[in-house]
Each structure stands twice: as C-alpha cells, then as structure tokens.
Image (cartoon, rainbow, N blue to C red):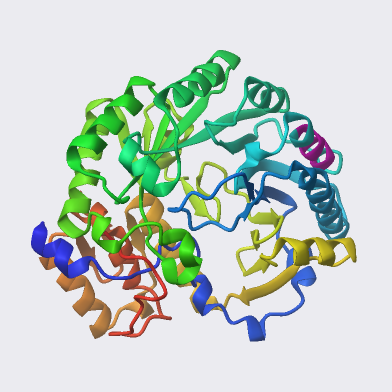
Amino acid sequence: MKQLIEKYNVSVPRYTSYPTMPFWKTEAFQDWETNVKNAPQKRLSLYIHLPYCESLCTFCACHKRITKNHSYEVPYIEAVLKEWKMYVEWMGERPLIEEIHLGGGTPTFFSPENLALLIKGILEWASLPDSYEFSFEGHPNNTTYEHLKVLYDLGFRRVSFGVQDYDPQVQKAIHRIQPFEAVEKVTLAARELGYTSISHDLVFGLPFQNLEGFTETVKKTLSLNPDRLSLYSYAHVPWIKGIGQRGYSEEDLPAGEQKRTLYEMARELYEANGYYEVGMDHFAKANDKMFQAYQEGTLNRNFMGYTTTNSPLLIGLGASAISDVWSAMAQNEKNVEEYLRMVNEGKIPVVKGHLQSEEDLQRRQIIHDIMCKFRAEWPDEFWNEELERQLEELRTDGILQYTPTSLEVTELGKAFIRNVCVVFDAYLRPGQALSKTFSKAI
C-alpha cells in the first residue's frame, strides 16, 4: 500500500462535475436562459447557498462571508427569492421540487424565522411530489432546537452536522472549537423530532491529527449512532483560499501513508459497526436511503455531493451557487455584494458556464458511474492503445479489472477512485502540472 500511495498521491480533481470547473469554456457559453427552458422536465433539485459564518474555520475551502452582523440575513434571503422567481418565470410553469439542500457557509447562521421565510417563499412558487427530500447543514455550536423544529415542520428530514475532529489541539488549529456535548445535544434533538437521516461529517488529514486522537473521534461519533457518515480528505489548497488555510504549517499535516492510515482505521470501525461504503468518502447504514440507492444502482452525484434523487435539473441559488441542466452548467457570482446588486437589478447572476459536447456527456456519464457504482461501461470507439495502457497499469496495481468496454473497481481500488476517473478526463494532458489546481488524491 505504501508504494501505491506514493505513486498515486498526486493532484487530481474530485469530479463533482465533468469537465471540472478550471476547464469550463466560458467564452463559448451563452444564453443560459435557453438552456434552462430546454431542460427535459421541470422537476428539479434546488441548492441554496447561505454563505455567512460567524467565525472562520481555517480548514474550509467553501465560499463564505465571515461576520457577526445578522442584519444581512433578510436582504440576502430577499435576493435569493427574487432569483428564484426569475427562474420560475423562465421555466414558464410551476416547477416540481424533488430536493432542497441548504449549504454554506453556515445555514444555521440564519435565524429559524428567517429560514422559514426562505423556504415558504420558495414553496410559494413551486409544487412538491409525493416523495421529496429536504436537507441542511447544521453547525453543532449554533443549531438550536428551534432551528430543527422549524425546518422539520417545513418538511426537512435530513441533517448533516460538521464534526471534523474532537481533539482539542486539532480544533484549535482549525479554529473550530466544538465539544462533543454540543454534537450530542443536536443529534439527540434531531432524532427526538423525527429526522430520519442524521449524518456526521469527519475530516482526515487535518493538522496535528494522529491515529490515537482520530480513533477517539471516530469512536465518539459511532456512540451517537448517526445514519450516515462522511469521511472527507482534507483538501489543502491555500493557493486558492489564501491565508484562511495558513493558520498552520504544512509540516503539521499528516501526509501520504500516515494520512491514509487515518482513513483505513475509520473505515474499519465504520464497517464493524454496520456502515457500508457507498461512494467516495461516504458510508451509510443498511436502512438508509443512500445505501438503498447504491444497491439499486440509482445513487447520484452532482454539485450537492451524493444524493438519492435524480432530477435532471439542478438550480443553484445564492452567491457562488452552481446550476446544472446536464447539457450545460453555470455558476453564480461569488462576491456577495455583487451577487446582491445583480439580482436586485433583475439579472440572473450567472458569470461563468460550460456547454457540454457529446463527448463531454459520454465521459461525464462514465466518471459519474465510477463515482457512484465503482464500475462503468463505455462505447466501443473509446477503446485505444492509450486507454488500454492506463487501465492495464491500474489493473497491475490491483486497483481495477477491465474489458475493452467496461471496468470494475476492486476493494483496494476504492482508495484510488479519483485516479481511476482521471483516465477518462480528456481535459487533462499526460504530465500536466496540477499541483496548484487540485488537491492530492490521498
């Protein structure tokens, strides 16, 4: 394993999309309105980006705005609702929302009353099917019983809590002081209210993490019996996020084999306690929708991460949010003030995008299937000597098995899933320097 880690621990994309954003051809992108109007159906998933946080977590690579001024809440929500109404007008009919996810930032920065204002405003212009999924990201330190109750009453049944690590030294380094008792309190409250899927997010590879301390974090997490678990690899990308990820030295980070040991320990404990690996970084219990979707081959992955819905249209609302109609993708303005200005002037705040070619769509499906099923098939015309050479190298290293038109990732290979996807990325050139573009694979 050590040799494989040294070989494959290179900078590669996480493949939330294909092509990945650095390779979007924005200069050829135009008329987002037509792309939305031509979406095959008006059933959709809705991602709402709520960017505000009261303090900076130095491990975070998300788009956020740090402030303690809560007077920003209502103007931001009003802008999101204006943006939503513009989309509804584009679609020309009342859309059917299958999924809503509140991400951030810190969604629970917003008061329960203002979150209710947001969701009621969204639903005023939409319909709901018999089965839908509403979820949000909750910060254990500021998620109150009132937050959980208000959102539950509005139809939310899934919540994810960012745990990261319980070790005091690690928490100090990442500026996320969060006692176990805070996580326990909100987890039990959510379960008491009737939330059917509670997830805890852990991160491995953080500064000062070691096997003993992270083992204790995993055991504490398991003691609360969440329905899902995420185990994210810390992406050290200070060249993108500036000083926010410079609160510690690179020498403080576990790397390579040491970092992978943290993951393997956690995975072993997860599996011993009834959790199944369902995709890169994700685990779920047998009775959870995510595991059931994985077994049925219907698990989906988009800009919200892994989901159990398969809506053909994803609309992203809010600063930096990303939308996807499968044949095209678009991202909103990242700067909050500029986003507000554009929306309040009656403009959809899209500033970059990509129109998919037929080849893009074929490769996107292959990469999607590798990420969601650990297997994939492709057309005969994809087969050539270079593809065979790369697959044969991965087969020799025990990472996958293949035929001229398909592959299946081995148990060992799941640790190198991003490296498998790279084989089908036509935008990456052999030997291309990516160390200042993407995080490392391990």
Q: Is residue 18 visible?
A: no
- Position of the C terminus, as image quadrant, is bottom left
Residue occupying the point 73% across, 45% down: 69
Say which of 222 and 376 sits in front: 222
- Position of the N terminus, as image quadrant, is bottom left
Vertical position of residue 362 compared to residue 254: above or below: below
Say which of 163 and 287 sits in front: 163
Quadrant in the rendering for residue 194: top right
Vertical position of residue 437 compared to residue 199: above or below: below
Residue 341 position in % (x across, y down): 83, 65
Say which of 436 and 241 sits in front: 241
Vertical position of residue 227 compared to residue 313: above or below: above
Q: Is residue 238 left or right of residue 331?
A: left
Q: Is residue 40 visible?
A: yes
Most extreme residue toward the top is 192
Whether residue 394 appears in magenta in the rendering, the answer is: no
Quadrant in the rendering for residue 328: bottom right
Residue occupying the point 49% across, 78% down: 359
Residue occupying the point 73% across, 69% down: 350
Magenta-colored span: 116-122
Residue 119 position in % (x across, y down): 77, 37
Residue 7 position in % (x across, y down): 16, 69
